[in-house]
Image (cartoon, rainbow, N blue to C red):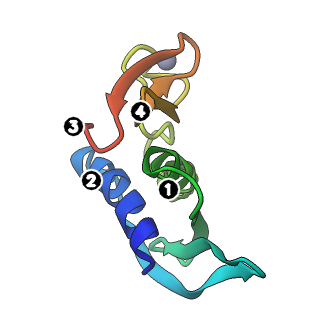
Amino acid sequence: MHPDLERALQPVLDDLRATSAPLPRRVDDDRPDSDDDGPFAARAMLWGHDGRGQGVFVELRLSQPEQVAQVADGVQAWAVEELWGSAPTNWPRCPRHPDTHPLQAQVRDAAAWWVCPRDDVPVSEVGGLG
Ligand SMILES: [Zn+2]
């Protein structure tokens, strides 16, 4: 796996683990996306128990916190699909509104945070849930 993608994925997987959410099987997409200036994005697929796949990617020009937020969006989409039908799908759950929306990954103060989208309040750094 591309080191930028591996590094961005780690805190989000830590959050899945910390919240007892399912964990994906990761399959690297070996070739980074490239253009005339060289590689610009790295991708992987996340697979669930019933064969549903979700792509995640990082743009290599972005800062590390931006990459974490980018990957968190993909992992969140995967987790919502994976939890569908068996558990509440609002992963990660917003502690301020536990019955409605999930948290949203955003960059705040040069770090990736899970933020309550309704109140615009940072709840936890990505990788710090649990
Ligand atoms: Zn909320």
Q: Which residue is mark 1?
A: 75
Q: Which residue is mark 2?
A: 14
Above or below, 2 relative to 84? below
The residues tagged by marks 3 and 1 sit, at their Cα atoms, a distance apart of 17 Å
* Mark 2 vs mark 1, CA separation in Å: 11 Å
Q: As shown in the figure, which amino acid type bears the numbered disc 3? A: Gly
- The mark lying in front, picked from 2 and 4, is 4
Q: Earlier in the sequence, mark 1 or mark 4?
A: 1
Who comes first in sequence, dot 3 or dot 1?
1
* Left or right relative to 62: residue 15: left
Q: Residues within 10 Å of mark 4 (few under 14, many from 20)?
A: many
Identified by mark 1, the residue type is Val
- Marks 2 and 4, how far apart at CA: 14 Å
Under mark 4, the amino acid is: Trp
Identify the mark nearer the N-term, 2 or 1: 2
Disc 3 marks which residue?
130
Residue at 32% x, 60% y is 10
> Of the residues under marks 2 and 4, which one precedes in the sequence?
2
SS state under label 1 = helix
Whether pointer 3 and pointer 1 mark residues with C-beta atoms closer than 8 Å, the reply is no
